[in-house]
Image (cartoon, rainbow, N blue to C red):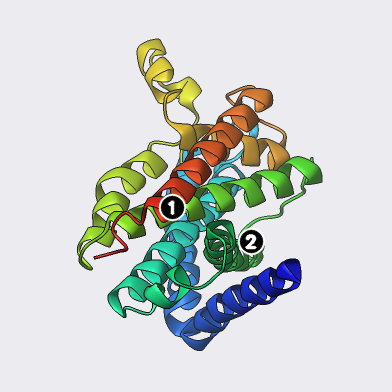
Amino acid sequence: MKLASYRVAFHTLVHKEIMRIMRIWVQTLVPPAITMTLYFVIFGNLIGSRIGQMGGHSYMEYIVPGLIMLSVITNAYANVVTSFFGAKFGKHIEELLISPVPNWVILWGYVLGGMARSLAIGVIVTIISLFFTRLQVQHWGITISVLILTSILFSLAGFVNAVFAQKFDDISIVPTFVLTPLTYLGGIFYSVQLLPEFWQKVSMLNPILHMVNAFRYGILGVSDIPIATAYSIICIFIVLFYCICLRLLQRGVGLRT
């Protein structure tokens, strides 16, 4: 009986999140598509034609996996942080906290919502990229698994931000000062092999670099880092953030007044 009730609660949360995404699709789906189109035009066509090849592929082909991953990362994070903080701000998160729904059900309900939006954006950006270049996926298993794992990771990260946020300004601090620099320095637009040896080693500390390269390997078959290392780092961060999220929910940090 408990399992059935948990299933109903989980399905309700996921359905609510998906309906929220679709209800405001002009804000959730259209802006990322327009932004990525501009990236393809400016960096791929205009600048890429002057750069030439990178990693044995045209510059447009090289940056497409990175831009898809960029859209997945930012939208997974943004969906959860805005949705959960909105629930806090509207005070209806208290209804979930006093209900007999386990914390892991609440957490995965929001995470699945973030995954739904980020993967939908990933598909949209991929379709848009086909108007600019041809993609031939080399390793489907790696491509799909890295995409899913990355969306889970940044949905969890967005949840942590939402728990600690006290006002709307707080949900933009981490994306602006942490997430954006890490993504743009994560090998989306360049190969780390172009950097001096010292900065190559420093770049290896950026977890987003591993995700971008693993995804690029899945599509193009080229990577600046070992794929096993990338999977290990992604999984370690997922476990870490998952434990943090459950702990925060259990203690009611930033949720109970």
The quarter of the rendered structure image containing the C terminus is bottom left
Q: Residues within 10 Å of mark 2 (few under 14, many from 20)?
A: some
Q: Amino acid at mark 1?
A: Gln
Q: Residues within 10 Å of mark 1 (few under 14, many from 20)?
A: few
Report whether residue 53 is seen. no
Which residue is disc 1 drawn over?
250
Q: Which residue is located at x 25 percent, y 46 percent?
A: 177
Q: Which residue is located at x 59 percent, y 62 percent?
A: 105
Instruction: Describe the element under mark 2 as helix, strand or loop.
Output: helix
Which residue is disc 2 drawn over?
126
Q: Which residue is located at x 64 percent, y 61 percent?
A: 126
Q: Is residue 127 above or below residue 155?
A: below
Q: Which residue occupies the foreground of this view, 232 or 217?
A: 232
Q: Is residue 184 above or below residue 191?
A: below
- With 238 as the anchor, is 247 left or right in this view? left
Q: Is residue 116 above or below residue 193?
A: below
**Which residue is the extreme one toward the top?**
197
* Image disc number at residue 42: none
Q: Amino acid at mark 2?
A: Thr
How far apart marks 1 and 2 lie (CA) works out to: 38 Å
Q: Which residue occupies the foreground of this view, 130 or 147?
A: 147
